[in-house]
């Protein structure tokens, strides 16, 4: 699935650091799950008794036969025949629930031309195998569109596709993760945390890659102690390198929120800080470290690290160049803004 590289800085939620991306650029990449959008034609996240041809309530189909029929005649049925009783009474029990009209499907957002769903990671396709072929293909297309719309910063469009995926496959971890990521990007921390928890519960491996996002949500909800407790949980040891870096950046931000600048700096003094600057996460790590140095009263060291982050940030994920210019006393003006004479300007 296409990567959404909208992260950076010491605060993954802040404007200076950029915005989060769905679990490393894909809405849900691990785990297994199933959707109840099968069986009885149910269109919600779960059907009634998934995989069977009728709802659970439609099982008393013996009405009008045997002793039941006899009791019906004795109760003043006036000698009506077996078939008549079965058609008037037993038929309501047997046919009613099964023949009830299905709920109409809500309108679904449009899939862009060329989007097939095959763009997703193989692990997501493994999750979708629990669905019917037609439903799996449709859900896959909506998950791709979530990433496309997030890349375009079209949060409303991304939400429409994510909610559609959840309606059609509510027990597929990737669908819940996609909705959680949309909520995260829109600043709805409580909803994001709820969806991430659901995705982890449904995942085969527990979805450890969501841990940094969940910690950041707890931080945003004003619960730093709970956030730090979650960051130190056993699941944190199962994180891949990139997720460990992201978690360290979030923990550093929490320490800064608590006015603990030295602890914030130490949280980022990890082996990855000495890694190759070409690693995709290194610019964000260096940027966050520069911020902790600045907060610790070390402006010259902070300048050096902002310069390193700026050099490594070839994708402009952070505003390291602007921070560096500010420390050097340079005021940048948008060159696309003409002055009174109609010429672009810049101040220094």
Image (tube, rainbow, N blue to C red):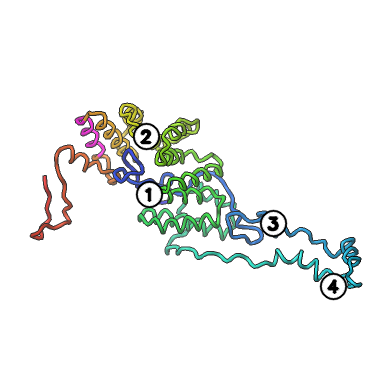
Tell me the chief SS of the magenta region. helix
Q: What residue is pinned by disc 4? A: 84
Q: Are marks 1 and 2 in contact (CB under 8 Å)?
A: no
Q: Are marks 1 and 3 in contact (CB under 8 Å)?
A: no
Q: Is residue 62 left or right of residue 74?
A: left
Q: Is residue 5 above or below residue 279?
A: below
Q: What residue is pinned by disc 3? A: 52
Asked whether 212 falls inside the magenta stretch, the response is no
Task: Magenta stretch: give its range.
Answer: 299-309
**Going 35% across and 54% down the picture, which residue do you hit?**
153
Q: CA distance from mark 1 to mark 4?
A: 65 Å
Indicate the quadrant where residue 24 lies.
top left
Res 98 seen here? yes
Q: Is residue 47 above or below residue 272?
A: below
Q: Earlier in the sequence, mark 3 or mark 2?
A: 3
Category of crowding for the residue at label 4, using alpha-carbon neighbours closer than 10 angstroms: few (below 14), some (14–19), many (at least 20): few
Q: Earlier in the sequence, mark 1 or mark 2?
A: 1
Q: Are marks 2 and 4 in contact (CB under 8 Å)?
A: no
Find residue 254 and name its label. 2
Q: Is residue 137 above or below residue 270?
A: below
Q: Earlier in the sequence, mark 1 or mark 4?
A: 1
Of circles 4 and 3, which is in front? 4
Q: What residue is pinned by disc 1? A: 4
Q: Is residue 130 left or right of residue 318?
A: right
Q: CA distance from mark 3 to mark 2?
A: 49 Å
Q: Are marks 1 and 4 in contact (CB under 8 Å)?
A: no
Residue 17 in percent (x, y) is at: 31, 43
Q: Are marks 3 and 2 in contact (CB under 8 Å)?
A: no
């Amino acid at each position: 699935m296409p990567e959404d590289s909208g992260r950076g800085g010491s605060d993954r939620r802040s404007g200076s650091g950029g915005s989060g991306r769905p679990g490393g650029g894909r809405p849900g990449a691990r785990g297994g799950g199933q959707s109840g959008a099968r069986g009885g034609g149910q269109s919600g996240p779960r059907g009634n008794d998934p995989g069977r041809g009728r709802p659970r309530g439609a099982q008393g189909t013996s009405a009008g036969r045997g002793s039941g029929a006899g009791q019906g005649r004795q109760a003043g049925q006036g000698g009506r025949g077996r078939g008549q009783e079965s058609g008037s009474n037993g038929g309501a029990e047997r046919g009613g629930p099964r023949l009830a009209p299905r709920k109409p499907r809500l309108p679904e957002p449009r899939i862009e031309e060329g989007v097939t769903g095959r763009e997703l990671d193989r692990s997501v396709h493994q999750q979708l195998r629990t669905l019917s072929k037609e439903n799996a293909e449709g859900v896959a297309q909506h998950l791709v569109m979530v990433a496309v719309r997030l890349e375009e910063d079209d949060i409303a469009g991304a939400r429409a596709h994510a909610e559609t995926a959840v309606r059609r496959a509510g027990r597929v971890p990737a669908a819940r993760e996609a909705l959680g990521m949309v909520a995260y990007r829109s600043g709805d921390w409580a909803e994001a945390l709820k969806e991430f928890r659901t995705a982890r519960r449904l995942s085969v491996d527990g979805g450890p890659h969501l841990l940094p996002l969940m910690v950041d949500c707890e931080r945003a909800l004003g619960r730093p102690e709970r956030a730090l407790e979650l960051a130190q949980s056993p699941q944190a040891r199962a994180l891949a390198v990139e997720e460990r870096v992201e978690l360290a950046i979030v923990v550093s931000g929490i320490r800064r929120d608590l006015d603990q600048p030295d602890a914030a700096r130490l949280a980022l003094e990890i082996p990855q800080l000495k890694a190759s600057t070409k690693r995709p996460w290194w610019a964000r790590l260096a940027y966050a470290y520069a911020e902790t140095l600045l907060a610790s009263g070390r402006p010259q060291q902070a300048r050096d690290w902002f310069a390193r982050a700026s050099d490594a940030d070839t994708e402009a994920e952070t505003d390291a160049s602007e921070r560096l210019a500010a420390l050097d006393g340079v005021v940048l003006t948008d060159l696309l803004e003409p002055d009174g004479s109609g010429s672009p300007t810049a101040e220094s």
